[in-house]
Image (cartoon, rainbow, N blue to C red):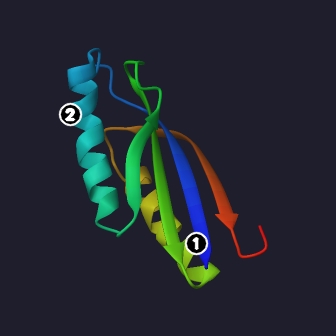
């Protein structure tokens, strides 16, 4: 069994100056990520306007499948024109970890 995690640091548009506006950007992104059958949530920068950290976790029998799913998630975020992807941090855990 292999697990993979990725954390996306995201810059939101300038009009997200309230937590309500921030949620209006983050909620659809998390919903889109969950279509890849992963666990996804806002995991950091919860009280910061204009920034968000979104975490994704996936479990699979094959490490290549884990990487493939995480690649798809990254492509999804990179393709969203309303946000800027600032950084991506990945980790892969296997049976020996």
Q: Residue furthest right?
A: 96
Q: Residue furthest top?
A: 17
Disc on res. 88 = none
Image quarter of residue 3: bottom right
Q: Nearer the viewer, residue 80 or 49?
A: 49
| Residue at image point 31% right, 49% down | 30
Relative to 19, does residue 36 appear above or below in the rendering?
A: below
> Disc 2 or 1, which lies upstream in sequence?
2
**Which percent across, then down, holds residue 70?**
51, 65
Query: Within 10 angstroms of label 1, few (less than 14), some, or many (20 or more) residues?
Result: some
Give the residue number, with chain letter if any, for mark 2: 24
Relative to 17, does residue 3 appear above or below in the rendering?
A: below
Give the residue number, with chain letter if any, for mark 1: 67
The answer to whether 22 appears left or right of 39 in the picture is: left
| Residue at image point 41% right, 26% down | 46
Say what secondary structure mark 1 lies in. helix
Residue 87 seen in this snapshot? yes
| Residue at image point 44% right, 67% down | 72
Say what secondary structure mark 2 lies in. helix
């Amino acid at each position: 069994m292999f697990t993979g995690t990725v954390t996306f640091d995201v810059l939101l548009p300038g009009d997200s100056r309230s937590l309500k506006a921030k949620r209006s950007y983050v909620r659809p992104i998390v919903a889109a990520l969950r279509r890849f059958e992963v666990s996804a949530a806002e995991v950091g920068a919860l009280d910061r306007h204009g920034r968000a950290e979104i975490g994704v976790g996936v479990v699979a029998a094959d490490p290549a499948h884990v990487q493939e799913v995480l690649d798809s998630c990254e492509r999804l975020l990179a393709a969203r024109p309303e946000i800027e992807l600032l950084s991506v941090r990945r980790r892969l855990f296997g049976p020996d970890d």
